[in-house]
Image (cartoon, rainbow, N blue to C red):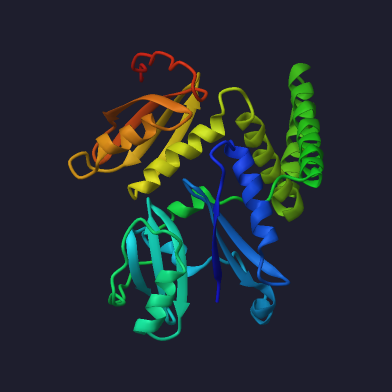
Amino acid sequence: MTRFRVYRAPPSLNFFQRAQAARVFAEAHAPFDNPGTLILRTTIGAAIWYWDRNKLAALEPLGRVSPESVWGAAGEGWRIVACAEGVAGEYWEAGCLQASMWRRQDFTAEQWRTFVLSVASPAIAAPADPPPPIKLPLSSIAWRWRVIGPPPSWRDAERASVTMAICAAAIGAFLSGQAIKSSAIAQREEARIEAVEQTLREDAPVAEAIEQHRFLTEYARATRPRHVLIAATEAQEVLARFGLQADTWRISDGQMSLLVNGVLGETPVRDVVRGIDEADHLCAAMPEIAGAGRFEIRANVTEPDAPCPAMAGPEERG
């Protein structure tokens, strides 16, 4: 069974400060001696789930653990959701889960009143009697874009540096053989490179170090003046609000492009564009058709309160 808490971040905190504050809050309010946690970024701060790792020890080895409630669609207001075992009362406000309470059996009138009274100053009035449980398909993956993970450590950086040194040495050897135009040397160095690449593919720690290097590279890009990672996260959060997900996205020369699967007549494109336009690090959002059942949204990446740069003309595509 999981426990749920909401962290409300001060409006003055920036993107990275909110993540750090949410981690500290989650650690300080952990209800178990050996807790597992899942922290999701929300518009007001963070949603936090806890579970007792000691109770899951009998199930080892485990993969990634996640609460059942994150896989269901978001709601608005008060509802009771049927779970694999028992039911969960939920209160949603402004697209954020504000409170959750699990029961093995259906809520009684007294239990429902207790749950309602546990929510401080709800904007939406609760029904007097518990509503009937609803069954939600466990198919939503939009929450994965909002996970706040642990910060990178020095060990991650060291492992990435070792991996890059190995790759640089192999590539340097290959280029040396090509430079002197010796087919024999080139063939020998190509064999060495293939051996190194095969070793990297088979060595799990090295493969993990390469992934850590990729993560650190994206982190470094996010700290540049244009706040690339912040803008990408804001765009994904807007899409998730409407049950959408970008098939691919890229940022180049200060401009973001997202390819989204959705039929124009059935998708609230104007609302999506308006939401992206209102994000702190995006502006001048423009949609256009990108083929059957797909559309593209382009927007400029900017800093908060900075003038929005003029949108460049359409790209030439060959």
Q: Name the residue located 41 percent from the left edge and 86 percent from the top edge.
A: 105
Q: Is residue 67 left or right of residue 88?
A: right
Q: Is residue 42 left or right of residue 239?
A: right
Between 9 and 20, the one lying in front of the other is 9
Which quarter of the rendered picture does the C terminus lie within? top left
Quadrant hosting residue 87: bottom left
Q: How many marks?
A: 0
Q: Name the residue located 43 percent from the left edge and 17 percent from the top edge.
A: 308
Quadrant hosting residue 63: bottom right
Between 208 and 137, the one lying in front of the other is 137
Residue 283: x, y in percent?
40, 24
Q: Is residue 169 left or right of residue 236?
A: right
Looking at the image, the residue that sits furthest to the left is: 265
Which quarter of the rendered picture does the N terminus lie within? bottom right
Residue 196: x, y in percent?
76, 42
Query: Can the viewer see residue 42?
Result: yes
Query: Can the viewer see residue 83?
Result: no
Rendered view: 28 above or below 31 = above
Residue 307: x, y in percent?
45, 15
Between 36 and 168, the one lying in front of the other is 36
Residue 161: x, y in percent?
79, 37
Q: Is residue 158 left or right of residue 81?
A: right
Rendered view: 177 above or below 88 = above
Q: Name the residue located 37 percent from the left edge and 18 percent from the top edge.
A: 315
Q: Name the residue located 70 percent from the left edge and 40 percent from the top edge.
A: 213
Quadrant hosting residue 119: bottom left
